[in-house]
Amino acid sequence: MKAEVLTIGDELLRGEIVDSNKSFLSEKLLGIEVETRFHASVNDDPADMRDAFLRAADRSEIVLVSGGLGPTRDDLTVEVLAQTFGRALVQHEPSLRRIEEFFARNQRAMSPSNAKQALVPEGCEVLPNPVGTAPGCMLDVGRAVFFCMPGVPRELYRMMEEQVLPRVAARLGGSRGVMRAALLRTFGLGESNLEDTLADVGREEGVILGFRTAFPDNFLRPVARAKTAPEADAKLARASAAIEAKLGPLVYTRGDETMESVVGRMLAERGLTLATAESCTGGLIGARLTAVAGSSRYYRGGVVAYANEAKRDLLGVSEALLREHGAVSAPVARAMAEGARARLGADLALATTGISGPDGGTPEKPVGLVWIALASKDGTEAEQMIFPFDRERHRVITAQTALDWVRRSLLGLPRLVPRYVRGATR
């Protein structure tokens, strides 16, 4: 069964917003064993929209449409869909009442233009929207079925989960083959090196191994197809186990868990706490850690010590170290980590200090140089690297490397210097 995702809106094609709806919808379809074969975006132009609808109906059985259900003049999805397939627009009274109740409940005056959102193609099934004013709709067109949903992510997510996925699953039946997929997140090895390392993995009939880069990580997606669910599950288990056996701790989790979630879970399981002292990363590590619910169990806090005076006054780094070695150095990185650990009363402490650029480098300390230190009761280790990236990616990979060092430390493994860096000290 072929699926297509079609997103609508001028703002998508102008690059004003990132079109995350496509990836969300495709991922949800994959979860019920439906692969998306086509992605398309179209602006708010009736002729272009009509062309996109006709193409989708010709080549796909399931078409998920996102956007264009609002109350303004450029929200044309339902109107053009109805015209394209010869359906009249009719007012759906229950939807109109829900829209009126929505405004009354929020003590807001309802604009006449909002009534437009209750118009749907004749013969469609209306999909309720519990968190917004625009209902969705399901329209059968020959062999294809169109699901129209709002473009606002929080509304789209609810409608996809509660209204669309159950209807798609009901249409699939049990006569077709079964597909299973997994997601393995890796850090520390480039995409081409992963391909070479896994050259003999995922070669079983009915198994496909996909690669995706999401800097600084690389994701592996093994997909297994078989006639029965147990057979597909067994194929997927074999492929996933082979990947993990080849890569070892380079695979840091399966599924949607982030590096900071993994580190936080491991700290909590061991009853340990972590503090941070950040210079070049500017609080990025602390922000990532505290983005995880429940992080107060293991994250003591952090110091963003950008200026030398802050390193001295807040972390206790001595003037002598700063003068002799400079802020970007092993002694200062170690002192920052030890200062954070002592002042915040943590079991472990991370420190980062570096030159993210684009300026500030010297022949001895080039742009991209970074020192990371990890302090514990057993002592303090520091490592230097040169990350050959722009300022933003330099900060991102520094934070990821630092968090990965905590993970590896908790596993009793040696710290990792990512393979795509230069200038490591070992």
Image (cartoon, helix red, strand yellow):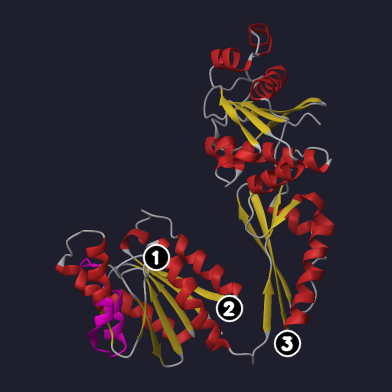
Q: What residue is rendered at 66% in x and 9% in y?
A: 318
Q: What residue is rendered at 65% in x and 30% in y?
A: 275
Left or right of 65: which side holds 406? right
Which quadrant holds residue 136?
bottom left
Q: What residue is rendered at 70% in x and 50% in y?
A: 190
Determine which residue is flagged by label 2: 34
Q: Is residue 277 above or below residue 45?
A: above
Give the class, few, some or many, for how many residues have Cα within 10 Å of label 2's Cα (few <14, many ≥20). Answer: many
Left or right of 310: which side holds 236? right
Determine which residue is flagged by label 3: 227
The foreground one among 127 and 255 is 127
Marker disc for residue 155:
1
**Res. 199 in view:** no
**Res. 209 in view:** yes
Q: Is residue 392 above or below residue 108?
A: above
Q: What residue is rendered at 83% in x and 26% in y?
A: 378
- Which element type, helix, strand or loop, lies under badge 1? helix
- Which element type, helix, strand or loop, lies under badge 3? loop
C-alpha gap between disc 3 and disc 2: 15 Å
C-alpha gap between disc 3 and disc 1: 36 Å
The region drawn magenta spans: 71-96
Which quadrant holds residue 264?
top right
**Does the magenta-highlighted stretch encompass residue 79?**
yes
C-alpha gap between disc 1 and disc 2: 22 Å
Give the class, few, some or many, for how many residues have Cα within 10 Å of label 1's Cα (few <14, many ≥20). Answer: some
Q: What residue type is labelled 1?
A: Glu
- Which element type, helix, strand or loop, lies under badge 2? loop
Mark 3 in CB contact with mark 2 (< 8 angstroms): no
Q: Nearer the viewer, mark 1 or mark 2?
A: 1
**Residue 388 rendering spot, x and y as whole percentages:** 63, 36
Q: Which amino acid does label 2 sit on?
A: Val
**Residue 319 rendering spot, x and y as whole percentages:** 63, 7
